[in-house]
Image (cartoon, grey):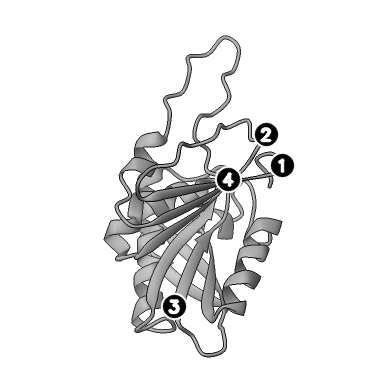
Amino acid sequence: MLEVDTPHGRAIAHLHPADGQRAALVLGHGAGGGVTSRDLVAATDAARSEGVSVALVEQPYRVAGRRAPAPARQLDAAWTAVVEHLLAGELRGLALVVGGRSLGARVACRTAAATGAVGVLCLAFPLQPPHRAGSAATPSRLPELDAVTVPMLVVQGARDRFGMPPAAAHRTVVQVPGDHSL
């Protein structure tokens, strides 16, 4: 466990080094969950089996014990600070793939260029929040996916109530059985 000071509080990176490190995968959690979700654990295990070291990042709002996420700009700034810290130290010299589950995937997409990522992994990307009766529809988050210019893998549950993103030239979408919890 590595504590990292960010512009918005202390974050924690849980490091899972791989034997013969070939690359690094830095993953963020969903809005209401932590870094022990099944899909993040499965991604960590799969990556490490291929020689990819993994850092699971807890955002400052979660470290501080808050359940509600910080605004996007704060999440992005904290995430970027953690990734920069890791690339200057524990993950120095490794090709970087960023990603996460749900909210963590959104943060990874928005910051992929700034962090120098060579790829993005999105688990349960929340494309379109479900419409609530009596409220205005929330805009699609497809522009966040479309803004990514490096190869991207999106793993989405076939029954995810947040929708199914379309494949694109730089984006592979894999549909798996399940809902948003994968």
Give the labeled residue for mark 3.
23
Of marks 3 and 1, which one's residue comes earlier in the chain? 3
Question: Residue 159 shows which numbered tag?
Answer: 2
Q: Earlier in the sequence, mark 2 or mark 4?
A: 4
Q: For residue 178, which numbered disc appears in the image?
A: 1
Sort mark 4 into few (<14), some (14-19) or many (20+) by Cα contacts within 10 Å. Answer: many
Q: Real-space Cα distance between discs 2 and 3?
A: 32 Å
Measure the alpha-carbon separation of dots 2 and 4. Answer: 11 Å
Please state which amino acid type lies under the numbered disc 1: Gly
- Sequence-earlier tag: 4 or 1: 4
Residue 180 appears at what percent x and percent y?
Answer: 65, 40
**For residue 17, side relative to residue 177 (left or right):** left
Residue designated by label 4: 124
Position of residue 50 measured from the top left corner of the image (x, y, whole percent)? 56, 78
**Residue at horizontal 60%, vertical 12%?**
133
Asked if 20 appears above or below 43 in the picture, the reply is below
